[in-house]
Amino acid sequence: MAGHALNKLIKDFVNRHRVMRGLKVDYRPGWDCHGLPIELKALKELKIKDRSHLSPMDIRTAAQASARAAIEIQKQEFLSYGIMGDFDNGYLTMDKDFETRQLRVFYEMMNKGLIYRANKPVYWSPSSQTALAESELEYKDDHKSRSAWVGFELETPSKVLADLLPKDASMQAVVWTTTPWTLPANRCVAVNPKFEYTLFRVDNSTNPNTVYLAASERMEEMKKRFASPATEGSEATTTHDTLEPIGQILGQDLVGATYKHPLTAEQFPFIVADYVTAGSGSGLVHTAPGHGMEDYKACLPLGIEAFCPVNNIGKFTAEAGQDLEGLLVQTEGTAKVLEILAEKGSLIQEEIYLHKYPYDWRTKKPVILRATSQWFANVGSIKEDAIKATESVKIVPESSRRRLEGFVQSRSEWCISRQRSWGVPIPVMYEVDTDEPLLTKASVQHIIETVKEHGTDAWWTMTTEELLAPEYRNNGKTYRRGYDTMDVWFDSGTSWTMIEEKMPRPHLPFVADVYSEGSDQHRGWFQSSLLTSVALTGKAPFGTLITHGFLLDAKGFKQSKSIGNTVDPAIVINGGKNLQKDPAYGTDVLRLWAASSEYTKDIAIGNTILTQVAESIRKFRNTARFILGNLNGFKEDQQVSYDELSRLDKFMLAEVYHFSKNVNAGYDEFMFNKVYTQLQYFASTTLSSFYFDVIKDSLYSDSEKSLQRRAIQTVLFHTLNAFTRSIAPLAPHLGEEVYEHYRDCFVVPQPSVFRSGWLDAPESWNDLRLKEEFSVLKYLRGEANQLLEQARTAKEIGSSLEATIEVQLIQSSNGADGNDQSSLSRLLKSYESDLKKLFITSNVTLMQLDAAAEQMEANQADMFVRDVLVPRVGSCRMVLRKATLHKCPRCWTFTSSEENTLCGRCGPVVEAL
């Protein structure tokens, strides 16, 4: 996937830039090896239909082999992208040393009281058969549920309620639920203590002695729910029956009342809870502490158990009742619950409800909330410290800081246990008789030492006695090991621990310089790394956090394997089967596509975009080719000193200075698209359209040993250094190729452009006066080009060298527009000998006019006239005439006194050959 390429390339841009800055870079590619996707892939590769007989070690062996095969493939892919790194010493989360460090993090968090076990509702994926963390969910906005309005029959009224109820009347509390399958686990009905509730009758009801209870604010909604079918001939599909209020009662006065469970007739209480709202439903909430976190928290202080009659594959257990046992809760189980409710007369109304619902991000199947015994990390006690720790972190883009803080702030606990075989085991023994966990320093340390020597496979291959610390082997108790494994985000979230062990940096902070991943990792790797690091060290594990967006196809749609619009980097580099449809662009085009993108947002890739990038790289090559061709024979020690350079050459070095400064800023800010833009502008506008154009005459026609030509070569040498070094981190193949062709120019050549140093434009090149002067001269050059084009259109000239230009200056000190005419005059007189090079004409002359002469007749057939106003500088008139001298056969300027003879410059040069 091109998304993986984008991530690796961003990291490589950073690394290569830092290497060229002379910094020691230690980049070891890493692979997250555990987890459900790899386990499922391995099981699929086994091609065994009945997997029930597979042991955990069968699965682990297959998963490990699958992971190693995938790693080798990815290594080659990353190398094809031009990624620079220590691939021979990369890290794998399934390596013994990594797993050992991970278990030590668990141990330290345990010692700080941050690890605990609880039987509470967690997100559970029936399709994956494991608990999930919030970070492993994605939400579908159009999930359809069969919602139900259900009547809960009153068993025992509270004192206040008893006084309100009519004699011999029965009461039903109206409850709305979008998850009817959770009703078997109902243990109470929650009301808001401050709400007013209304007792009411329904006219035309088949149960005239039945009264109902709902929040007073929801009475209009009740009219809809108790609507009767319309009578024959009526235009309406339903009629709203009249609701007769009987009395009102505060929620707090319902405490003490009980009701009959609508499915089992068991007796359960009404409780009060502040989270009950009147925004939807009836104002009374069906509460199942085994299937909802709010429900669990409300019931916990009341001693109400978290009952959950649902198994790990999402089917009802026997505890749900004989009619429901074995049914999938979200489909046939829901249907059966509704059927039973209807039979018992408890179903008031049913409807399809469209809403946002969590899905397993791996299997794309809906999840459920299910109370199970799981292991948790207490995030709530460290999240404020975690947020504070990010204050010193540079975050790119800065706008993503709020996203990361939001995810951390919203968490109070982290479910770290998973019910899978392929992972790092949670190092806990359980007493067989009591199921109490053995989680002590001695026990966990012993397990860590065992893993350090034998790896985590030992948890499944060694005996329980061997895994048990010696001090617990003869204490009269029998133990069993647990088989839960750790959340893979706990795996990857401890990767920072290898910095101290594998990449020690004395006197430097115990953090990675840069973490970079997609925006989904704010709730994944970024967050888990931050939390584990803050838990142990009090600090963030990264100095800079770079977030990139996701990939879109050429039409702007999110790339997805399911719709077949993904882009394969291998095809971008090598081409597809049909090279006309999918041409081979090469590695540097893929890299420059990544560099050109504003990666902090979602970015597009497609042939049109790649073709544009390929055109840019062609121009970069042409720029380098021109300079290389004109550096032939030049040596670094032949440079002309800065003081001996012409003002044009000094101006070009000023441009190199500002180009280098802007490129540096782009790399330092991790804004590689700014570097790419600078390269484009520098190559196309500064060099090709201006400097190269102006110096060609001297390069091609001056004496090879002339000071002027050598001065230009000096500038080209510095220009190529800056250009090659700037582009090398982004397009290393081009950077190396260019450097290879001029490395002999150096007194001490380096074996690679990446060892040649970084941009070294001295401050002395930053001549702001020259920059200001040349901004005027380039403006005048543009006006001269307009005049030359006018003459070409009139077919008076072909080449610009066929023309001469007379620049007429005005004597008055101030023009009518308030500009100082004398400043323009002084500038042009100062550069008079350079103007013909700047304008690419055979000659440019200056003429001083008085104000009256400015009104000269300008309609002569042999001239073209253009009045020029230079903003804030002054005005002049340009007069173009056809050159009267003859064309020099060597330099092609019209400066020879006779036809077919060399001009005054070329004659001596040729004679000296």
Image (cartoon, rainbow, N blue to C red):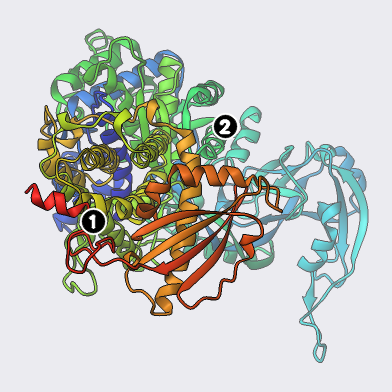
> Where on the picture, by quarter, is residue 899?
bottom left
Q: Residue at x 39, y 63 (%)?
A: 804
Identify residue for label 2.
Answer: 409
Residue furthest bottom as drawn: 233
| Residue at which label 1 appears | 622
Q: What is the crowding at mark 1: few (fewer than 14 residues within 10 Å), some, or many (at least 20)?
A: some
Against 711, residue 643 (above or below) is above
Residue 858: image location, x then y, percent? 56, 71
In this rendered view, identify the residue nearer to me: 109 or 582. Answer: 582
Relative to 822, is 333 above or below?
Answer: below
Answer with mark 2 or mark 1, whichever residue precedes in sequence.
2
Pointer 2 local density, CA inside 10 Å: few below 14, some 14–19, many at least 20: some
Q: Is residue 876 above or below residue 345?
A: above
Q: Give the percent coordinates (x, y) of residue 910.
A: 11, 52
Horizontal and vertical percent for residue 368?
Answer: 49, 50
- Residue nearest the observer in this picture, 731 or 785: 785
SS at mark 1?
A: helix
Query: Image quarter for residue 221?
Result: bottom right
Can you see residue 43? no
Secondary structure type for disc 2: helix
Amino acid at dot 2 = Gln
Left or right, residue 336 beside residue 102 = right
Q: Is residue 7 above or below residue 22?
A: below
* Depth check, front residue: 251 or 356: 356
Spatial CA span between label 2 and label 1: 53 Å
Is residue 558 shown to the viewer in this render? yes
The three-letter amino acid code for the residue at tag 1 is Asn
> In the visual, does 337 lie left or right of 33?
right
The residue at 61%/30% (across/down) is: 300
Point 36% across, 21% down: residue: 511
